[in-house]
Every structure is written in C-alpha cells, then in structure tokens.
Image (tube, rainbow, N blue to C red):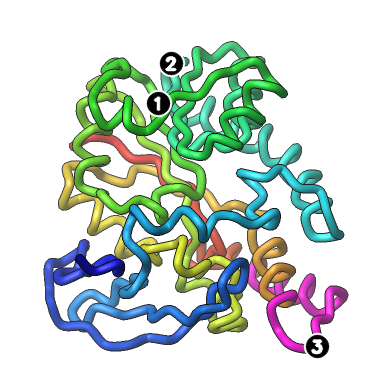
Amino acid sequence: MSSTFHISACPVCSSSQFTVFTEVPDWLVSKEAYTISQCNSCNFKFTSNAPTAENIGPYYNSEEYVEHSDTKSGVIYSVYHYARKLMLNFKLSKIKKSTEGKKLLDVGSGSGYFINHMKQNGYDVTGVEISDKAVELCKDKFGIHAKNPEEFLAGKLDTDYDIISLWHVFEHVYTYDEYFELFSKSLKKDGTLILALPNSDSPDAKLYGKYWAAYDTPRHLWHFTPDTLSRFAEARGFKVVKKYRLPLDPFFNSMVSASYKPGFTFLPISVLKGLYSLIISFFNKEKSSSLIYFLKKK
C-alpha cells in the first residue's frame, strides 16, 4: 500500500488533468519537498504527494505548530498570541452579525481559545480535536473536553447545531466529502457552516512563492481561492452567502514566510509586505490573505 495520498480527480471539477504548480518544502518538520499541482480545468491547487492520513501524524510534531503546542517561543509566536486575543472578538462579532442560534460545533478546536471565548459569551459549545496534546491543553486551561473526530465521523454527536465552524482546519481534511455530508446532517435547516481558509490567490502568496507559510505542505492538502471554494461547496449542496477578510493574517503569513527565507529580515520588510497585501484586499476582498466563508445549505 502506498504511503502517499493519491488524488486522481480534482475535488472541485473532477478533471484528471493536472500540471505541477510548484514544489514546496515542509519548512516546519522534515524539510522534504512536496508537489503542489494545479487542475488544468478549474485551476484548483492541491498537494499531490502528501503522506496518507495514517502517516501524517509525525508532521505535526513541532513546537511551531502553535494550535497544538500553544508555544509562545520567539517574536512571531508571541505576536500570534496577542493577535489571537484581538481576533477572538472579531470572530464573535461576525458570528453574531451573520448567524442565528447559539449551539456551536467547532471542528479542529485546537487548544480551545475560540470555544472558550464563545462559551463565555453565552454559546453552547462542543469542540472536536484530533491532537491529544491540544485536547489536554483545552481541558487544563478551560475545563472543556473536546471530542475525538471519530465520534463526529461516526455520527455520535448532535444533529441540530446552529453553527459549525472550522478555523484554518478544512485544508487539512482528507475525507472532504464525508465531512460535508456530516455538516449537512449536523446543521439545522437554516444553520451556518463557517470555513476560514488561506487564499492562494492573495498578494502575499504570490510575493513569497514556495516560502508562503499558508502552503504549509504536507499538512495543508487543499489550496483554495474564493472561486474554487465556492464551486467546491456548490457541488456539495452549500452556497457561500458571506465572506469576510481576516485582517491580521497577511501580517502573520508574511512574518512566518519571511522566517523561512535565507537571510531572514523580520522588520520592516515582512510587515510592509503584509500591509501591502491587506491594502490590496480592501480594494478586492477576493485577494485577501485568508477569508472567512459563511455557507448555508441550498
């Protein structure tokens, strides 16, 4: 059995004709090079030679994988923790504005900061998390015990959620159709699916190329743009109804990307590149470094 995750058809348009887009090293763990391919028909990009789901575990074993380690080591991750505090209120405000109901399932809940913030603001929360280390951090810090994804995939969780959210998680998911079927079954009729995803069509992605942090091979399998995400969701019975930019992501992505390059210069160049990307997104939201997509069942 191959230890490589094989993709024979484009998840967006089902074409089997691909070309190599670029080669990207695993900057965090192994330094092995991975291929990002692009569909000849719809231009969707994906990591075409990632390890299988059974073999991906060791590639998350890095203190720099902050959602599982909660590290505050170094300037970049100290900035990350400060930015996360700001973004928790930002996410809450967008959810209040764009959804109804307060029963929330967060898939990929990490060390629990988001679900704890939502709980403190009156939401009935359930977390799903695959990392044992992150589950323990969530339990120790916030007293919330996240469920294992196997419980979700087995249909053992509730089927009447108002909101299901995945914050920079869906790009990691191998069995995307299985998850979308469960999203459809687990949401109320007028429930909302929230996906936050990097945008491979953003200015910072183009500025940094193979060094762009949000390619994050081999952990990121799918490299969406607003167009390909919309087409992907439509094919699975969902429609994008609202989009919001994540305003701090261009700065974080630029700082981390710069740290991967030889002759790393933290300031001011990486911050200026992040600012450039953010300014472009004010004129065209479709160019945002990352986007939050609010989806409804069709």
Residue behind mark 3:
263
In-image side of 188 versus 91 (left or right): left
In-image side of 1 versus 87 (left or right): left
Residue at (20, 50) in percent of width and height: 234
Residue 248 in the magenta stretch? The answer is no
The mark closer to the camera, 3 or 2, is 3
Residue at (48, 82) in percent of width and height: 33
Q: Which mark is residue 41?
A: none
Residue 224 visible in the current orientation:
no
The mark closer to the camera, 1 or 3, is 3
User: Residue 67: which quarter of the image?
Assistant: top right
The amino acid type found where label 2 is placed reads Lys
Residue behind mark 1:
163
Image quarter hosting the N terminus: bottom left
Percent position of residue 174, x then y: 30, 53
Residue behind mark 2:
103
Spatial CA distance of label 1 from label 3 is: 44 Å
Tell me where the magenta segment starts and ends, as one range.
259-277
Residue at (83, 54) in percent of width and height: 73
Q: Which is more N-terminal, label 2 or label 1?
A: 2
The amino acid type found where label 3 is placed reads Gly
Spatial CA distance of label 3 from label 2 is: 48 Å
Which residue appears farthest toward the front when viewing the image? Answer: 1
Please tell me whether mark 3 sits on a helix, a strand or a loop. Answer: loop
Q: Are marks 1 and 2 in contact (CB under 8 Å)?
A: yes
